[in-house]
C-alpha cells in the first residue's frame, strides 16, 4: 500500500511536469528575421563578425565590406554578374584585403600583403578584369581603389592615378594633373561616367569624363581657386568634396533631388563634416564634433533617413557608404554594419523583430513585407511603399481591426480580418487585384485562406470551401477557377498563387489541382501529388514553378521552371533523401522549407540577393524557425523563441518532485 501510494504520487507529478514542459516549449510566435534584399549578412552585422571598411555600388545594390579581424572581403546584394562573389585571393581562402570598392557591376579590392588590385564581376562592358599591370602587381601596386562606370586606383609610391574599363566619355583617361605627368593624387572616386581625385601637390579637386550636367566642372571652393579639399566623392551625375580650409561640404553637378545642395548642418553654415559618402543621387556625411549622420538628396526609399541607432544621440559611425537607394555605415564602438533605405524589405521593424514585439505570421512581396504581430494580431508592414502596399488600412492595422491571415503580391497585400473573416486588400490595384469580390469581402461571403501573387489573388470561401479568384491571368483576362475546386465538382483545403498560375489541394482527395499559365509546366502537377501515385499536404507557387509537400512521405516535390537557378530541384535535406519538410514557401525563383527533423530552414533556387542563403539563426546552426515567407529577392522567418517558460517549468518540476518525495518519506515514517 505504501509503495503503491508513493508510485501514484510520483506518477502524478511526472504527468504534470510533462504537461508543464510541453506547454513551455510549444512552438508559436517569435522574433522575425530577414535575409537577402540588401540586408547585411551575419559576417559583418555583429552576429558573427563586424567590419573595418565598407563600399557600395553607384547604381545597383552591390555592397562589400572588409571583415574585422580576418580582413576577408564579404559582399552582398545584387549578384547577376558575380560582383558580390569575391575570389579566393581576397575572401580569406588564399588572401585578404586592406581596401574595397564597388561599382556598377563589378567590385575591386587591394590584396593585403601584396597591395595588388584584384577585381571581379562583369567584364563584358566595364572591363573590370584584369586590372592593368601598373596596379595588378606586375609593374606596380596600389594604395587606393575606386569603382564606378570605370575603375581607378592610386599607384603606390608614385601616387599616379591609373584607370581602366569603360572609357566612352573619357572616364578612364585621367588627366596629366593626376596621372603622374604633372601631378599625383591622395584621394580617388569613380562616378557613373566620370571620376574625381584630390591632387596631392595642391589639394585641389580634379575631375574628368562626362560633363553633361556639370559634374566635372569643379567649383572654385575646392578647385584651388578659393579653396582645396581633403576628400572627394563622385556620384551618378554630381560630385561632392570636403573643403580643407573649413571642413564644409561642397557639391556640384546634377541637382534634381537636391543632391548638390548640402544642408546647413554640413555646408559650414551650422556645421561641417569629417567623412563623406556620395551615392547615385543622395549623399550622407558624418558631422564634425557630434558624429551625427546628415543625409540629403533623393529619399524615396528612406536612403536619406538614418536610423536612431547611429544618428548621433544614440550612436555614431566610423565609416559611411552610399549607393543607388541605400546607405550603410560601420557603427562606432561595435563595428557592426548598419544599412537603411533600399526598401528595407528584409529588415523587420522593432514591433515584430523581438525588440518591442514578435510575429505569428509573415508574408513577403516583391519589395515589401508584412507580418501579423503576436498578441495584438495587427498587421505591420515595411519596405517599398510606392503603391501603399506597406500601409495597411485601419481595418487590420489594430486601429479598427486586426487579421488572422495575410498574403502579399507583387505590390499589394491582402489579409483576412479577425472576427469578420472578410478579405481586405491594399496597395496597387492594377487589374482589380486589390479589390476583393463580394463573395469574400463580407458582402455575401468571407474567407478562411488567402493567396496573392503578381496580378491576381485566390481565397477559399468560408463554409463552402470553394476557391474564389480575382484579378487577371496571363492573357489579361479574369482568372477562371476549374470545377474541381470552384464548388461545382469539388472544393479546396489549401491554395497557392504564382505569377500567372494557381494551384489548390482538393478537399477529400488531397490531390493537387492547378490552372492558368503553363509555359514551363508549372500548372501540371506530377503524379507524385496529383492523385495518381500520391497527394499533398501543403503547396507553394513561385513565378513559374510550384512545390508541394507529399502526403505520407513529407518530401518536397517541385515542378515547372527550373532554369540555372534550380528552383524546382529541392535538395536532399527536404526531398526525402536525408530529410523532409513541414512547411514550404516559394518566391519569384527560389523556395524555402522548414525541415521536419530539425526545424532548420533550407532554401534553394535563385540566390542573386542571398535570399536562398539562410543565416545561422535559422539554418540549424544557432537557431531554427516556425514560419517562413519568400519574396522576389528576400526571405523572412519567424524564429523559434527561447522558451520563456522552460526554466520555470523545470524549476516547478524540481520543486514538485522534492515535495512529493518529502511527503512520501514523511508518510513512510508515520506508517
Image (spheres, rainbow, N blue to C red):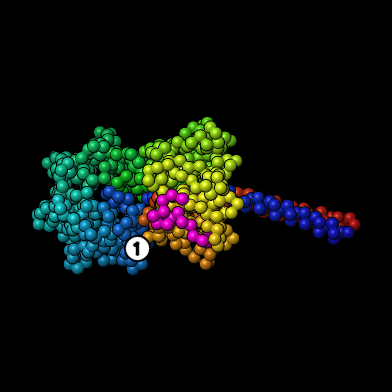
Compare residues 46 and 334 and report the one nearer the observer: 46
Rendered residue at 26%/45% (across/down): 280
When the figure is inspected, residue 312 is found, relative to residue 3, above or below; the finding is above
The percent coordinates of residue 435 (x first, y second) are 45, 36
User: Is residue 575 shown left or right of residue 60?
Assistant: right
Residue drawn at (16%, 54%) of the image: 167
In this view, 470 is above or below 644: above
Give the residue number, with chain letter if any, for mark 1.
91
Q: Magenta span has 578?
A: no
Name the outermost residue toward the top.
400
| Residue beneath the point at 36% across and 40% down | 302
Total tally of numbered discs in the picture: 1
Chief secondary structure of the magenta span? Answer: loop
Q: Is residue 546 left or right of residue 256?
A: right
Q: Quadrant of the C terminus?
A: bottom right
Pinpoint residue 218: horizontal percent, then vertical percent.
Answer: 15, 43
Quarter location, residue 160? bottom left
In the image, 507 versus 211, the foreground residue is 507
In the figure, is residue 454 to the left or right of 552? left
Using a 10 Å C-alpha cutoff, classify the residue at mark 1 as few (fewer than 14 neighbours), some (14 to 19) or many (20 or more): many
Foreground residue, 49 or 35?
35
Q: Residue at x 32, y 50 (%)?
A: 61
Q: Is residue 18 left or right of 63 when viewed as pictured?
A: right
Q: Is residue 523 magenta?
A: yes
Q: Can residue 280 be spotted in the picture?
A: yes
Secondary structure of the residue carrying tag 1 is loop
Locate residue 380, reporting x and y percent: 48, 40
Residue 99 in the image: above or below residue 304: below
Residue 432 in the image, given as x and y percentages of width and height: 42, 37
User: Residue at the right extreme?
Assistant: 671
Residues shaded magenta: 515-529
Amino acid at each position: 500500500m505504501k509503495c503503491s501510494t508513493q508510485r501514484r504520487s510520483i506518477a502524478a507529478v511526472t504527468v504534470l511536469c510533462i504537461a508543464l514542459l510541453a506547454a513551455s516549449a510549444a512552438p508559436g510566435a517569435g522574433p522575425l528575421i530577414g535575409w537577402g534584399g540588401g540586408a547585411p549578412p551575419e559576417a559583418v552585422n555583429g552576429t558573427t563578425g563586424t567590419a573595418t571598411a565598407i563600399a557600395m555600388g553607384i547604381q545597383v545594390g552591390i555592397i562589400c565590406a572588409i571583415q574585422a579581424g580576418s580582413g576577408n572581403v564579404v559582399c552582398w546584394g545584387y549578384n547577376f554578374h558575380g560582383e558580390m562573389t569575391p575570389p579566393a585571393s581576397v575572401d580569406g581562402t588564399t588572401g585578404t584585403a586592406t581596401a574595397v570598392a564597388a561599382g556598377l557591376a563589378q567590385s575591386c579590392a587591394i590584396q593585403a600583403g601584396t597591395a595588388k588590385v584584384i577585381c571581379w564581376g562583369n567584364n563584358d562592358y566595364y572591363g573590370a578584369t584584369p586590372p592593368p599591370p601598373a596596379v595588378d602587381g606586375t609593374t606596380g601596386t596600389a594604395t587606393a581603389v575606386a569603382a564606378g562606370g570605370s575603375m581607378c586606383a592610386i599607384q603606390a609610391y608614385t601616387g599616379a592615378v591609373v584607370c581602366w574599363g569603360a572609357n566612352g566619355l573619357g572616364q578612364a583617361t585621367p588627366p596629366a594633373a593626376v596621372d603622374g605627368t604633372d601631378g599625383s593624387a591622395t584621394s580617388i572616386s569613380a562616378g557613373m561616367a566620370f571620376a574625381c581625385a584630390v591632387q596631392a601637390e595642391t589639394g585641389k579637386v580634379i575631375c574628368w569624363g562626362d560633363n553633361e550636367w556639370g559634374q566635372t566642372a569643379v567649383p572654385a571652393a575646392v578647385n584651388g581657386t578659393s579653396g582645396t579639399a581633403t576628400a572627394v566623392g563622385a556620384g551618378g551625375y554630381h560630385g561632392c568634396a570636403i573643403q580643407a580650409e573649413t571642413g564644409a561640404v561642397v557639391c556640384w553637378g546634377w541637382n534634381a533631388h537636391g543632391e548638390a545642395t548640402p544642408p546647413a548642418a554640413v555646408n559650414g553654415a551650422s556645421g561641417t563634416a569629417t567623412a563623406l559618402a556620395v551615392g547615385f543621387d543622395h549623399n550622407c556625411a558624418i558631422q564634425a564634433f557630434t558624429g551625427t549622420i546628415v543625409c540629403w538628396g533623393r529619399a524615396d526609399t528612406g536612403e536619406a533617413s538614418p536610423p536612431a541607432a547611429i544618428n548621433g544621440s544614440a550612436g555614431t559611425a566610423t565609416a559611411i557608404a552610399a549607393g543607388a537607394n541605400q546607405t550603410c555605415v560601420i557603427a562606432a564602438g561595435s563595428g557592426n554594419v548598419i544599412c537603411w533605405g533600399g526598401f528595407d524589405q528584409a529588415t523587420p521593424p522593432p514591433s515584430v523583430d523581438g525588440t518591442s514585439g514578435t510575429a505569428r505570421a509573415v508574408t513577403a512581396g516583391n519589395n515589401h513585407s508584412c507580418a501579423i504581430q503576436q498578441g495584438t494580431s495587427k498587421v505591420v508592414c515595411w519596405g517599398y511603399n510606392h503603391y501603399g502596399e506597406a500601409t495597411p488600412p485601419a481595418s487590420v492595422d489594430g486601429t479598427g481591426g486586426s487579421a488572422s491571415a495575410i498574403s502579399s503580391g507583387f505590390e499589394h497585400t491582402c489579409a483576412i480580418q479577425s472576427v469578420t473573416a472578410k478579405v481586405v486588400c491594399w496597395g496597387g490595384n492594377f487589374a482589380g487585384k486589390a479589390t476583393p469580390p463580394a463573395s469574400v469581402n463580407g458582402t455575401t461571403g468571407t474567407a478562411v485562406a488567402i493567396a496573392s501573387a503578381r496580378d491576381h489573388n485566390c481565397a477559399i470561401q468560408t463554409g463552402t470551401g470553394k476557391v474564389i479568384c480575382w484579378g487577371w491571368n496571363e492573357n489579361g483576362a479574369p482568372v477562371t477557377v476549374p470545377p474541381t475546386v470552384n464548388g461545382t465538382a469539388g472544393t479546396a483545403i489549401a491554395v497557392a498563387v504564382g505569377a500567372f498560375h494557381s494551384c489548390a489541394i482538393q478537399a477529400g482527395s488531397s490531390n493537387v489541382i492547378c490552372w492558368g499559365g503553363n509555359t514551363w509546366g508549372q500548372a501540371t502537377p506530377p503524379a507524385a501529388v496529383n492523385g495518381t501515385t500520391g497527394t499533398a499536404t501543403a503547396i507553394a507557387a513561385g513565378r513559374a514553378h510550384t512545390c508541394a509537400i507529399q502526403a505520407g512521405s513529407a518530401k518536397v516535390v517541385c515542378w515547372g521552371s527550373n532554369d540555372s537557378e534550380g528552383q524546382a530541384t529541392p535538395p536532399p535535406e527536404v526531398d526525402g533523401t536525408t530529410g523532409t519538410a513541414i512547411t514550404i514557401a516559394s518566391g519569384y525563383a527560389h523556395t524555402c522549407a522548414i525541415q521536419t527533423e530539425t526545424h532548420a530552414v533550407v532554401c534553394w533556387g535563385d540566390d542573386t540577393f542571398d535570399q536562398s542563403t539562410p543565416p545561422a539563426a535559422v539554418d540549424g546552426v544557432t537557431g531554427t524557425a516556425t514560419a517562413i515567407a519568400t519574396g522576389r529577392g528576400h526571405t523572412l522567418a519567424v524564429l523559434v523563441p527561447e522558451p520563456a517558460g522552460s526554466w520555470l517549468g523545470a524549476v516547478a518540476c524540481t520543486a514538485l518532485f522534492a515535495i512529493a518525495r518529502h511527503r512520501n518519506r514523511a508518510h513512510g515514517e508515520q506508517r
